[in-house]
Image: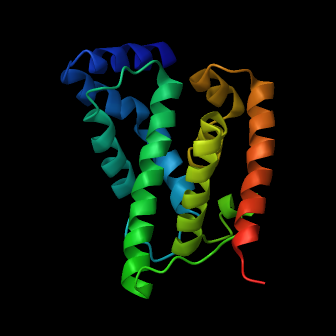
Amino acid sequence: MEHDITALLADLSDGDENAVNVILPRIYDELQAMAHGQLRRERADHTLNTTALVHEAYLKLVKQDRVTWQNRAHFFAIASTAMRRILVNYAHKRNAEKRGGGEALATFDEGMGSPARETKAEELIALDTALERLSAMNERQGKVVEYWFFGGLTQEEIAEVLGISVPTVRRDWTFAKAWLSRELADELPE
């Protein structure tokens, strides 16, 4: 199955428009699961539902004419980035409408990923801003956080996409998690 998806992604990279129609049914369930994981952290009244997030991200992905899809893990890593950007854009829009655009502060914890904990637009924006700073400092660690936290990729998938070992993924995650916690905590008012 993974080989079939990789071959279809290669066809898509080569401009085969039929590949779009063939690949979607094969990856749809995984995209749904990824989107559901993203949205379960969002507020209950979010204007996007799982299906809408999948479709919006998929449209962005198939319009990529400068991407050479390496394999299934690479596709899902980019999908996680697309979904993150869509949700952050929605959070910025909601924050601007609700509060006139002022950014609130947040703390980073893995509990943000818990289905029992709803992430507020302000927290998502603060996390995104901190993640951008981390990525500027260490791009690979930023990607590890993005693919793990936002994309739900496994350590093995992240290692494959980034061309590093699983222990390196673990070290990067540990460092990045501590850095983000400190960065966001430092921004909180006393």
Q: Position of residue 1 (x, y in %)?
A: 48, 18
Q: Is residue 28 left or right of residue 148?
A: left
Q: Nearer the viewer, residue 44 or 69?
A: 69
Task: Locate residue 159: give its quadrant.
Answer: top right
Question: Would you say residue 179 is visible in this rendering?
Answer: yes
Name the residue at 81% across, 26% down.
167
Vertical comparison of 55 with 128: above or below: above
Q: Position of residue 12 (x, y in %)?
A: 28, 21
| Quadrant of the rendering where the C terminus is positioned | bottom right
Q: Position of residue 60 (x, y in %)?
A: 30, 42
Q: Nearer the viewer, residue 44 or 140?
A: 140
Name the residue at 72% across, 82% down.
189
Name the residue at 75% across, 37% down.
172
Vertical comparison of 101 with 38: above or below: below
Vertical comparison of 11 with 112: above or below: above
Q: Is residue 45 left or right of residue 65?
A: right
Q: How is the image coloured?
A: rainbow
Q: Is residue 170 left or right of residue 52?
A: right
Name the residue at 68% across, 21% down.
164
> Tag count in the figure?
0
